[in-house]
Image: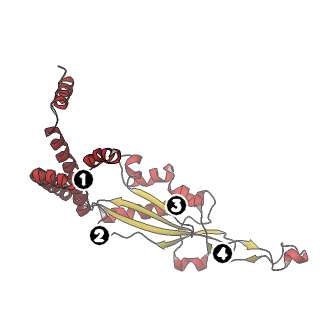
Amino acid sequence: MTTEHQLTPIADDEINLLDLLLVLARRWRMIATTTLFAALASAAVAVLLPNRYQATAKVIALQRQAIQPIGAAFTGEKATVGVQKLPLMPVKQPVLEDILNSDRLMLIVSNQFHFPSLKAFKKQYEVKGAKSGTIEVSAEDADPKRAAAIANAAVAELGRTAYSLNLVVSPEINAEHDLGKIGSTVTTAIKLLEPATPPLEKAKPKRTLIVVLVSAATLFASIMLAFMLEALGNLQQDDRKRWDDIKRAFKGR
């Protein structure tokens, strides 16, 4: 008997799925209307948003390292004579990424394209580096040609800045066909893998995604509101009095 008496309140407190469905059935018009309105409103806003295009230029850092002749460590042979030169190999160069992310470079490029501020430029500019040495320089703009021009200008400025810092022997970014011209004494070079070209497809806005996310969020919020309204409608007299007191308190009465 004692066990049954203890289990009864627990059973009464369990959520009845039929009660939840009943609430949804009573409030479905409010839920559907609110969600539909949000979907239409978000679609209208998404249509009005201007297209944004992103262009990306890719460069890679190349480095040549001097090594001792094979067996020199065992024979005691000096490495001053007959030092072999490795070909230029891809390496990760964090300093080049730092240059591309520096305020100095970004300010030069932003002034070149008449950005209102450096902060505005940073919102449309991105640099990504990989362990392989590849660096992607991306620019975003409403004009696809301007986006490509900004990315290419940043790459060109990278070459000039690296040259001024004695990191490379030429301010020019080397294309594939120019690598053979690099002398054997050059230890570091920047190779242009892919110049930025005007993109054919927009990067933003993702209009469908905007509508789906807004509609889903509104649907969830309207369902929560339906349960809240149902709970307020079923308040006991004492609870209703407390609720009225809370409303009066907010109104300052």
| Outermost top residue | 253
Q: Secondary structure at mark 2?
A: loop
Q: Earlier in the sequence, mark 3 or mark 4?
A: 3
Tag 1 or tag 2, which sits nearer the N-term? 2
Specify which label sits upstream in the sequence, 3 or 1. Answer: 3
* Residue linked to disc 4: 183
Image location of residue 253, percent across then percent down: 17, 19
Question: Which residue is the site of mark 3?
Answer: 158
Q: Which of pointers 3 and 1 indicates the residue nearer the eye?
A: 1
Between 161 and 99, the one lying in front of the other is 99
Between the C-alphas of marks 3 and 1, the distance is 44 Å
Q: Is residue 25 above or below residue 149?
A: above
Q: How many residues crowd mark 1 within 10 Å: few (<14), some (14–19), many (20+)?
A: few
Q: Is residue 136 left or right of residue 238?
A: right
Disc 4 residue type (three-letter): Gly
Please provide percent x and percent y for residue 127.
47, 60
Residue 215 to residue 201: above or below: above
Q: Which residue is mark 2?
A: 201
Distance from the alpha carbon under mark 2 to that under mark 4: 41 Å
Residue contact between numbered discs 3 and 1, judged by CB atoms under 8 Å? no
Q: Residue 199 at what x, y percent from top left?
A: 33, 69
Rendered position, 7 above or below 194: above
Distance from disc 3 to disc 2, alpha carbons, whole Å, reads: 27 Å
Marks 2 and 1 in Cβ contact (< 8 Å): no
CA distance separating discs 2 and 1 = 28 Å
